[in-house]
Image: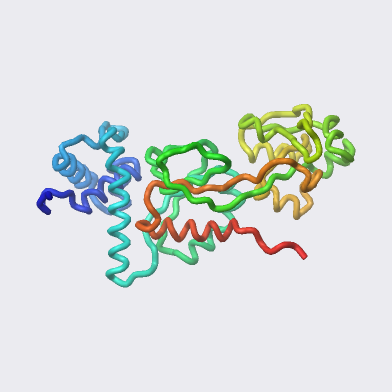
Amino acid sequence: MRHMHDLPQTRDLAAFVAVVEDGGFAEAGRRLGVAPSTLSRTVTRLERMLGVTLLRRSTRMIELTPEGRELLQAAQDIVARTEGLFDLATGSRAPRGPLRINAPVSFMLHVLGPRLAEFHAAYPKVEVTLDMTDRMVDLIDSHADVAIRFGTLSDSDMLRRHLGVTSWHLVAAPAYLAAQGLPGRPEDLARLEQVRFTAPDHINQLRFRGLSQPVTVPAAAYAENGEAVRSLVLGGMGVARFSEFMVAEDLASGRLVELFAGKLDVPPLDITALFLTRTSGLRRLAVFLDWLEEVLAPGPPAP
């Protein structure tokens, strides 16, 4: 067993984690109120103790070495668990500290954006940073504590938690349907036009219960972002298929009309949180995921 003085100090690991998560010594120094040179010396001391290079440094950026990437997840877990022990020892029950959330643009605009004030009111000491991207991200490279993603996910070493599901809806603008005529059967959609997602293509497929083949609708336009597709549909360019959270308010207000409700033959879309640090050691992540699962929980059925 190693002597205590041969083991890395938690504060050194915390400095290393902060530099990586903030993207540099200057950024971490500003957040922590510590001189960048002090953080640099701390990381150097940690590298010397471990006998490996953790970061490649340049004047513009830092980059994790393979050894640094391997250490980061363990260091994050140690720091998070230490914070949890401190809270327990001091009797503090309120989670605190930075929480970086990565999520698709549409989820941020329609779910997190309108509701995050509730989380802030409940946990004012949790400092939330939001990053929006529709592509899969590397949690280490993006400095994210948690990423929210949809659909079937590939196997990975990341921890995950299923948060809920969202259903699909085929919609169009009332003015568009007034001009083109309301389709009476799914097959009648072929005389309309569809606003399509550039990718993934399966979102554009319109399968209905009772039909052996999908209905093909001519393309009016393509867009790679869900909000762009939604904007085009609201403007009367055609029909499109959306997840419920993207168009729930549009349907309730009458800005959009649903076509063939309940007849789409498409499984609901899974909503999953991906993260690297166990929530038992990072209370601010644990309470955020608990809160988000409540937000996504289905409401009581309509009378």
What's the residue at 31%, 38% (across, down)?
Answer: 69
What's the residue at 37%, 61% (across, down)?
Answer: 96
Left or right of residue 116, residue 231 in this image: right
259, 160: nearer the viewer: 160
User: Which quadrant holds the C terminus?
Assistant: bottom right
The percent position of residue 99, horizontal first and vertical second, equals 41, 53
Left or right of residue 301, residue 110 in this image: left
The percent position of residue 66, horizontal first and vertical second, equals 29, 33
> What colour scheme does the image use?
rainbow
Q: Is residue 214 above or below residue 3?
A: above
Residue lying at the far bottom of the rendered structure: 91
165, 146: nearer the viewer: 165
The percent position of residue 24, horizontal first and vertical second, equals 31, 41
Left or right of residue 140, residue 272 in this image: right
Picture quadrant of residue 126 = bottom left
The percent position of residue 85, horizontal first and vertical second, equals 29, 63
Instruction: Count the numbered circles shown.
Output: 0
What's the residue at 42%, 56% (across, down)?
Answer: 285
